[in-house]
Image: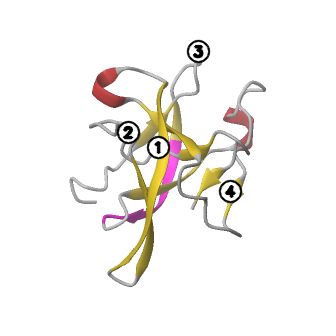
Amino acid sequence: MSSRNPASVEIAFKDQSFVDAKLLLVDLYLDLAVLEIPRKQISAGPKQAQLSCDDWPEIGSKVGAYGHPLSLDFSVTTGIVSGLRYRDNRYWIQTNAAINRGNSGGPLISIKSGKMLA
């Protein structure tokens, strides 16, 4: 694998030890990776995130950007959906929530519904 696709990947849930994960897909354009984690490695604490694909979020609706920006583990910044764009044959959600190095690949979640926006 190239340096952009590491030979091994580890993940950790909050307050848990690191476990191995399998890299299934990398999309450099979307800055997205899909990982497979053995069910037995998932502790009882984490909730399964629901994906909201049916409707576009309303402009002005409150969102949270989750991730590990600037090595601040398990943090969230809040903002609003500030625009909906169509560019490069894709639809994009624009937000004014602070996004920093380390938020990469983290979800944008609707504060109202608790679902990931896609």
User: What's the amino acid at mark 3?
Assistant: Asp
**Which residue corresponds to mark 4?**
51
Q: Earlier in the sequence, mark 3 or mark 1?
A: 3
Alpha carbon separation for disc pair 4 and 2: 18 Å
Q: Earlier in the sequence, mark 4 or mark 3?
A: 3
Quarter occupied by the N terminus = bottom left
Alpha carbon separation for disc pair 4 and 3: 24 Å
**Which residue corresponds to mark 2?**
103
Q: Secondary structure at mark 1?
A: loop
Residues shaded magenta: 21-28
Between label 3 and label 1, give the one nearer the viewer. Answer: 1
Residue in the foreground of this view, choosing between 22 and 96: 96
Label pair 4/3, CB-CB below 8 angstroms: no
Q: Secondary structure at mark 2?
A: loop
User: What's the amino acid at mark 2?
Assistant: Asn
**Which residue corresponds to mark 3?**
15
Quarter occupied by the C terminus = bottom right
Residue at horizontal 34%, vertical 50%? 7
Label 1 crowd bin: few (<14), some (14–19), many (20+), radius 10 Å: some
Q: Secondary structure at mark 4?
A: strand
Alpha carbon separation for disc pair 3 and 1: 18 Å
Q: Earlier in the sequence, mark 3 or mark 2?
A: 3
Alpha carbon separation for disc pair 2 and 1: 5 Å
Between label 3 and label 2, give the one nearer the viewer. Answer: 2
**Which residue corresponds to mark 1?**
106
Residue at horizontal 55%, vertical 42%? 63
Q: Earlier in the sequence, mark 4 or mark 2?
A: 4
